[in-house]
Image: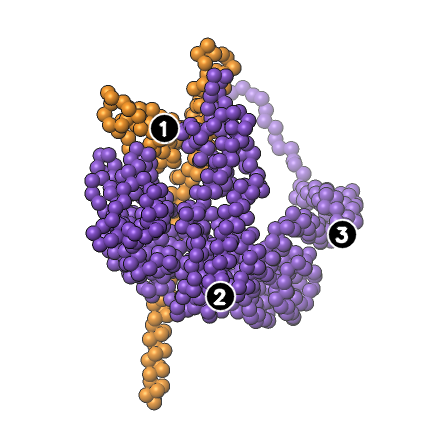
Amino acid sequence: MPKILGIDLGTTFSAMAVVEAGQPKIIENKEGGRTTPSVVTLAKNLERLVGITARRQQITNPQNTIFSIKRLMGRRYSDPEIQRDKKLLPYQIKESSDGGVEVKMGDKWYKPPEISAMILQKLKIDAEEKLGEKIDEAIVTCPAYFDDSQRKATKVAGEIAGFKVGRVINEPTAAALAYGLTKKGEKKIVVYDFGGGTFDISILDAGPDTVEVKATGGDTHLGGDDFDQRVMDWIVGEFKKEQGIDLSKDPLALQRIKEAAERAKIELSTTLETEINLPFITSDAAGPKHLYYKLGRAKLEDLVSDYISKSIELVKQTLKEAKLNPKDVEEIVLVGGQTRMPKIQEEIKNLFAKEPCKEINPDEVVAIGAAIQAGILQGEVKEVLLLDVTPLSLGIETLGGVDTVLIPKNTTIPTGKTQIFSTAADNQPSVEIHVLQGERPMAADNKTLGRFMLNGIPPSPRGIPQIEVTFDIDANGILNVTAKDKATSKAQSIRIEGSIGISKEEIEKMKKEAELHAAQDQKKQELIEAKNLADNLIYTTEKTLRETGDKISPDSKKEIEEKIEALKKVKDSDNIEEIKNKTSELSLAIQKIGAELYKTPGEKKEEGPQAEEGEYKEKK
Amino acid sequence: MTPDLKKKLEDCQKKKDEYLAGWQRARADFLNYKKEEMERIKEILKYGNENLISKILPILDNFEKAEKEIPDDKKNDKLLEGILQIKTQFQDFLKNQGIEEIKTTGEKFDPNFQEVVEEVEAKDKESGTIIEETQKGYTIHGKVVRPAKVKISK
C-alpha cells in the first residue's frame, strides 16, 4: 500500500512522518535531521537550496533567502500582520494583482504557496529516498486559526510539490491525535504550542467523530528565540559590567554567545545549573579576554518570567472566549520545543490542576499526528488497533516481600508473560499469588490488585516445585493471572479489571514516589537479597553436612558449623555488611568441604617405577 | 438456515478472513521490522559517537583559539609546547575515530559543508571563494558533524 506522508509545515521548522507497521515514525531528511528549517534560497550560483543548506548561506544573501513564509500564506497584502512582518523581513514583499502577496527571490516574484511548495518538495524527495518508494499523497497541517484562503494556499502548495493533499488538518488536532485523545468520548482539550517563533493556543472539543475548534489565541511573534535573546542580553550585560566591553558590537563574539545562550537554556531544562564557558571571546590592548559565567535555572526563569506570564494570560483569555474554566479542561497537550522548560510545565500544571501530555517529542508531535491521520484515512490504523500500554509495572510478591515484575510499565497490550517460581520452605503445600501494581521494589509500597492461593503442592524440598505464573492482559486491559503447578497440573487463576484504567495523576504520583525513594528502596532491596542469599547458603550447607558429613574431617565440620551459627545470628539483623561478611566466611569454609570430598581416602598416589639415568647405547 | 442467520454467518466469515489477514500482516510487519532494526543498529553503531563528538568539539575549538593568541616571543616556550602537544593528542584521537576536518580556505563555498558568517571584499578572488575559516568543521565517516564557519569573498 502506498504510504501517505504526514507533514508539519512550520514557520521556522518542518517535520514529516509516516505510519509504518501501524506505528507513526518521523522520517529524517537527506542531511540526517529529524526537522528541516523552513528556509528557501536562490544561491549566488543560481542553485536552489532548501533547508539547512539554505540557512548556512543566509548571511551572504539576506534578500534572496526566504524564511517564515508561513506568515504570508493566504493573506491579503493589506492585512496588518503583513504590514508588520514586512518591516521585519529582509526580503522584498509586494502586492500581487489579486490583492495577495508576492515575494522576490532572485529576479522572479513568487506567491507564498510556491515557496512552501519548494519546502514540501524537498521533504518529498528526501522521504522517497529514505523509504525507497514513491509518495504521491500527503496530509499537511496548518494552524487552527487559518481561514479558508490560508488553508487553500496550503493545499495548493502541496499540489505544486507533487502531492495529492488528502486533507489539511489543524496542528492542535494533529497533536491531540498523536496522544490518542480522540478515541473515547468527548473531551475538552487545550493545546499549548510554544515554538521557535510563534505561540499558539487552541481549545478543542474532541471526540471520535469530530474535532471542533472552540477558540484560538496566542502571539505570532513570541517564541523560544525570544528566550535565547534574553539570555544573550544578560551575558552581554554581565560582561559589560565586569570588563567594560560591549560584546554586542562584535559579530563573531555575538554568534558564539548566541549559540552558548541557546545551549544553556536547553541544558537548564534538565539541570539546575550550567556554565557558559567562552575563553578568548575577545581581546584588547591588555590581551585576550575570557568569559565564564554560571547560570542557574532560577535565574533563567527570572529572565523570562514576563514571557511565561504573558503566555499564561493569553491562555486564560482564550479560555474565556471559549466560555470555559480551567477545571473544565480535561487534557492539555504541549507542542513546540520551548514547552520542555520545567517552569512552563509547572505554570500549566498550576493553572489546570492536572498534568499535561508531554511524553511525545514536542518538536515532532504534530507531524506524528498528521501521519496517524493519514494512517486512519488509509485504514492502516484501524481504531481498534490503536493500542494502549500498561502505565505501571505488574508483578507478584516473592521471598522477602520483594515485588518481582512480570510486565514492565509502558508495555504495549495485549500481551502475556510467563515465569516459573518455586516454594520458599520445605514441604510447602501452597503458594500465595499476590498481584501487585507499581514501581517500588517492595511489595508493601505498591498497590495490591488481587490475591489467590494455589494449594495441593506435593511435599518437596524448597526450590524444587515448578509453579508457572502467567500474566495475560487483553486489549481492554483485563488482567488474568494464572498459577499452575507443573507437577500436578493443578491451576488457579484470578481476573482483574481496570488494571490500566488508572488516572494520569495517580501514575505520576507513583512514579515520583518511586524516584524519591529510589535510593532507600535500593538499599532495602540489597538487604533482602543478602538475607535471601544467606538463608539459601545455610540451607544448602546444612543439607550437604547431613548427606556427606561422615566424609569430612571433624575439624572442618566444626569450623563450618561455627560459621553457620555466626551467620544465623546476624542474618535477621539489618546490618547488611555483617551479613555479607559472614556469608562469604561460610562460603569459603564450604569450599574446603568441596576440596575434601573430591579427595576420597584410599586413593593415594603410588610411586611408579623411577626413570633411571642411563646411557643410550645403539644396538648393534 | 434463516436468511438472518445466513447473513450473520457471512459477516462472521468476512470478519474472520479480515482478522486472519490482519494478523498475518502484523506478523510479517513485525518480522520485517526486526530486519530493518538490525540495519538501524548498524547505522547507530557507525555514527553513534556523532552526538558525543559534536559536544566535545567546542573544547578543541577553544584550544585552537588559545593557540592563535600565543605571542611570537613565546612560541618556543616549553610549557606552551607541552600544552599544544595535548591539543595534538586530542586531534589525533579524533582522527582515529574517523573524524576529519572539512577543507575550507581557498575552496569554493559549499553549503553542504560550510556556513557563511561574513562576506568580505576580495578583489583578486572569484566570488564565493572561502577567504578565512573562523571555526573548523568536521565529518565523521563522511557525514557532516558540524559545518565549518567561513568568511567568503563577495
Q: CA distance from mark 1 to mark 3?
A: 63 Å
The colour assigned to chain A within the rendered structure: purple
- Give residue B90's position: percent from left, percent from top: 46, 26
> Could you say whether the residue bearing mark 3 is in a helix, strand or loop?
loop
Q: Is residue A487 left or right of residue A2?
A: right
Q: Answer whether residue B39 is visible to the viewer in this image.
A: no
- Give residue A371's position: percent from left, percent from top: 36, 57
Which chain is depicted orange?
B
> Could you say whether the residue bearing mark 1 is in a helix, strand or loop?
strand
Q: Which residue is mark 2?
A: A323
Q: What amino acid does circle 1 point to?
A: Glu
Res. A247 mark: none
Q: Residue furthest bottom?
A: B2
Q: Which residue is mark 3?
A: A572
Q: Is residue A598 above or below residue A483?
A: above
Read off the chain for label 3: A
User: Which sits in the foreground, A220 or A397?
Assistant: A220
Q: Nearer the viewer, mark 2 or mark 3?
A: 2
Q: Is residue A541 left or right of residue B61?
A: right
User: Which sits in the foreground, A341 or A29?
Assistant: A341
Q: CA distance from mark 1 to mark 2?
A: 59 Å
Q: Which residue is mark 1?
A: B101
Asked if marks 2 and 3 fall on the same chain, the answer is yes
> Could you say whether the residue bearing mark 2 is in a helix, strand or loop?
loop
Q: Residue at x 36, y 69 (%)?
A: B20
Query: Dot 3: within a 10 Å radius of its alpha carbon, few (fewer than 14), some, or many (20 or more) residues?
Result: few
Query: Dot 2: within a 10 Å radius of its alpha carbon, few (fewer than 14), some, or many (20 or more) residues?
Result: few
Asked if marks 1 and 3 fall on the same chain, the answer is no
Q: Quadrant of residue A511?
A: bottom right
Read off the chain for label 1: B
Q: Quadrant of residue A402?
A: bottom right
Q: Residue at x 38, y 51 (%)?
A: A26
